[in-house]
Image: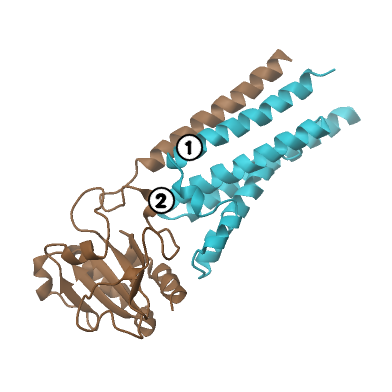
Amino acid sequence: MTAAIQTQARTGLRLCLWCVAAVIAELGLYLSYRGHDARFHWFTHFFVGSSAALVLMAALAGRWRRPVPYPLVWPLTAHLFAMTPDLLFSAGTAHQRWMDLFLGHLSTHFVWGRNYTWYVVFLAALGAYLLVIDRIQDRP
Amino acid sequence: MATSRRSLVTVWLLTAVVLGVLLAVAETAAGPLDDADPARQRPGFLDGFGLPTAAPSITGEVPRAGRRAVVFFERAERLEALCANLDGSGLADGADLVIVVADSSAGNLRCDPVAIVEDPTSDLSGAYGLPRPVGGGPPVGYAVVDSRGRLRYRTLDPAVAGELSEVRTIVDAVP
């Protein structure tokens, strides 16, 4: 195996490990929201956080002319930021209005269409990021 | 390049289908005691949805000035679990507790030292503004009243007996 191939294999493995770690982390977060009514909250914060991350990723990828590194970690990080008030709640602090600073933690639950609206927003943000990646690859 | 574009489209479609299915499953998993609008169930913040308002009287002593109160709304067949978990929860240290039971058999039920009040016509749950659950019938949930007699929080919560720490968090947030 040449050094170049070995490097590619290592890079691929590292990316894959990050993918698995991010998916496992999201699964853990989902399970941490007990009951289906709480999982309603997981979906909201996942879609909102991931959408914000994907918009940022698209902007940075377009500027850098290359995909962002560890693409699944960005949505996970933004999701954790969006759900921070829920972590505080678990520690005994009730929600307060200022917690909307965490990507609209309270108000995002009350948009028209509820989570279906955020689902559409998320798919649009994902599409925007993938479109940027596609255009970068098309350029000579 | 066409292959790469196909891969990107595949990623988008796969993500759309997987998350769409998961979302649909989660949305259709509502139980008969849940709120029709999941956003209003266990919101976790005070003074939402038209609150605060003056809390209607449940008994001559609850709510009373200078003391917080938690008004549970429960059904007779589920009362045992709530009573068992209230005992030793420490919730009574910070607030007066009362359980409103829709069934007319509530007069025979005991949950000492927590008072039980009958509400066969759902007048009390209506006065507290608790919504009807998806499956109809009287609501299961709770309301929190502050020490000035203002209703600050109300929610349906079919799993309230197992989530008294959450009730404690809300009680601690009101004066």
Q: How many marks?
A: 2
Colour style of the rendered protein structure: by chain
Counting other residues with Cα less than 10 Å from the Cα at mark 1, is it few (<14), some (14-19), or many (20 or more)? few
Query: Which chain is tinted cyan?
Result: A
Question: Residue tagged by mark 2?
Answer: B39
| Dot 1: chain letter | A
Dot 2 amino acid type: Ala
Q: Is residue A67 visible?
A: no
The image shows residue A134, relative to residue A68, as above or below, that is: above
Classify mark 2: helix, strand or loop: helix
Q: Is residue A100 above or below residue B147?
A: above
Say which amino acid is labelled 1: Thr
Say which quarter of the image contains residue B66.
bottom left
Q: Nearer the viewer, residue A6 or B159?
A: B159
Q: Quadrant of the C terminus of chain B?
A: bottom left
Residue at 35 percent across and 81 percent down: it is: B95
In percent of the image, x 74 and y 35: which residue is there? A59
Locate residue A48: give its quadrant. Answer: top right
- List x then y, in percent, for residue B30: 32, 46
Task: Residue A29: give x, y in percent of width and height.
Answer: 54, 52
Judged from this view, the residue extending furthest toward the top is B2
Q: Which chain is brown?
A: B
Write down the residue under mark 1. A117
User: Does residue A127 appear left or right of residue B62 in this picture?
Assistant: right
The answer to whether tags 2 and 1 share a subunit is no
Query: Residue A60's quadrant in the figure?
Result: top right
